[in-house]
Image (cartoon, rainbow, N blue to C red):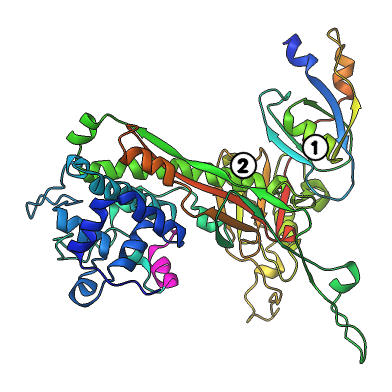
Amino acid sequence: MADKKADLIKVKKAVDDGKVAIWESNERHPKGEIFIANTKGAHEVAQTPAVMRAISEGKLEQVGGPKKKAASSSDDDETGDDDK
Amino acid sequence: MTIEAMGTRELATALERDPIRIMKDGYDKGFNVSAYLDRLSPTDGPDQKMGLDAFSRLLKHYGIVTRSDRQTGYWASSVNEFLKDNARKALMMEYAARVWRRVSNAKPSQPVYEERLGGQRAIYLSDGQPGSWERPYVDAMDARWSQQIAPAIPLAELIATTTPIEGDLYRAYYLTYNAADVRKYRVGESTEIPTATLSDADRSIKLHKFGRALKASYEQLRRMRVDKFAMHIAMMAIQAEIDKVAKVIDVVVNGDGNSGTSATNHDLTTLDTDAAAGTLTLKGWLSFKLKFANPYSVNVTLMQEAVALQLQLLNMGSANVPYVALEGNGILGGIRPINRFADNVGFGWTSDAPTLKIVAIDSNWAIEQVTEIGGEISETERFIMNQTEALTMTEVEGYAVLDPNSMRTLDVNA
């Protein structure tokens, strides 16, 4: 579980163009799936190749680094839900 | 160069001499094996009336029966008949390919399919005419077998056009307007006509291999009847079809790898401010459909089972029937949409769709299927030349976005 947390970063959609920035099913993501289509809030995602590609292509921007091992629950509250 | 027509016996001799060469020659010219055999030995006269193409005549020449019929006492040959020499092995691979194509080209409504292809169906199917040597019986009007062996969501429902290519990299062209040209304003005298540009700037898609291998020893294959072998191939084709539909969903939502080709998303709670995230509403659904403006209209939607259930159970309301639902001949009159409107939108449910989302397309404009001609030749060659016992059926395909405006997603959970 700790390894999985260490893999996580926070991202947000970089461009407000109404288009889907990324949709990926991967068990490494906190809920097993991410769908980022609007610029509202940050999303906690795993550093999968698709996520890293979306960052390098400018579709996503990283707004938080890998979470610390002893992250508090309040950190989770700050994280935008992938689907909301 | 004109090709001198061969008789069936000559064709069999040529195939026995070098089956790989015939297959490769066909692929080089853009034909699959059945089509090329028919080109070398055209079908006419009585054979045409009986529905036998060159491939079927070769099966007849070698005495290979592909279906059993207990009533009339016909039994399908054992696969062993196909394994006797390289020519017959080549026919076995093509027989498997024909079964594969029958599944992967299946349309939801077979009569419509036949009508749309305008009689080409016989070219692609391996079933002969009723009463013919190859099919010495009359089929039921609706073949139960073929209805069962069909993909749940036919790929054909999602594809606008198919382009055959050579090689595994395809550069797609895009029709682009500049923002001002999108408006269909009146063109004044001596002014420039708004121009659409066919653009190919750095936009390409990669093709991927879809398929399955059936690993069976020659001993196992020998004991199997051809019709049972066909069922295994059909099941493999269905699985490949499921994989392709999943890939198409991915391309619709995420784009084909090129900039600006992903779907436009709409949040349910934006379309219907009274809606709660996670619960589809009629207003949200109708509003989403209206986002497809002329010339687009949604005709295919894909979603997971939970959303499909919500869609089917949408509350029409019992106290207040919407005005649009009224028949037009009452005292209140009625209204009639004049935009191209998507009535009877097709919906398919699959676990490969995003969670709590509806993926919607106008399938006339959305996705181009790109397929490599002869992509399976190397596996076929290995099987024929005894280098493997795995019978591999593959297709090399990719999917390009034709028009991103024809693809939208509804985020039911936002």
Q: How far across and down, in percent of the image, does residue B3 sit?
A: 34, 71
Q: Is residue B63 above or below residue B393?
A: below
For the point 85% across and 7% down, the residue is: A70
| Mark 1 residue crowding within 10 angstroms, few (<14) / some (14–19) / many (20+) | some
At label 2, the amino acid type is Ala
For the point 68% across and 43% down, the residue is: B357
Which chain is home to disc 2?
Answer: B
Residue that numbered label 2 is attached to: B353
Quadrant of the rendering where the N terminus of chain B is positioned:
bottom left
Q: Main secondary structure of the magenta part?
A: helix
B122 relative to B113 in the view: left or right: left
| Residue range of the region highlighted in magenta in the rendering | B107-117
A59 relative to B371 in the view: left or right: right
Please, which residue is most extreme toward the top here? A70
Residue that numbered label 1 is attached to: A54
Q: How far across and down, in percent of the image, does residue B30 sit?
A: 46, 61
At label 1, the amino acid type is Ala
| Mark 2 residue crowding within 10 angstroms, few (<14) / some (14–19) / many (20+) | many
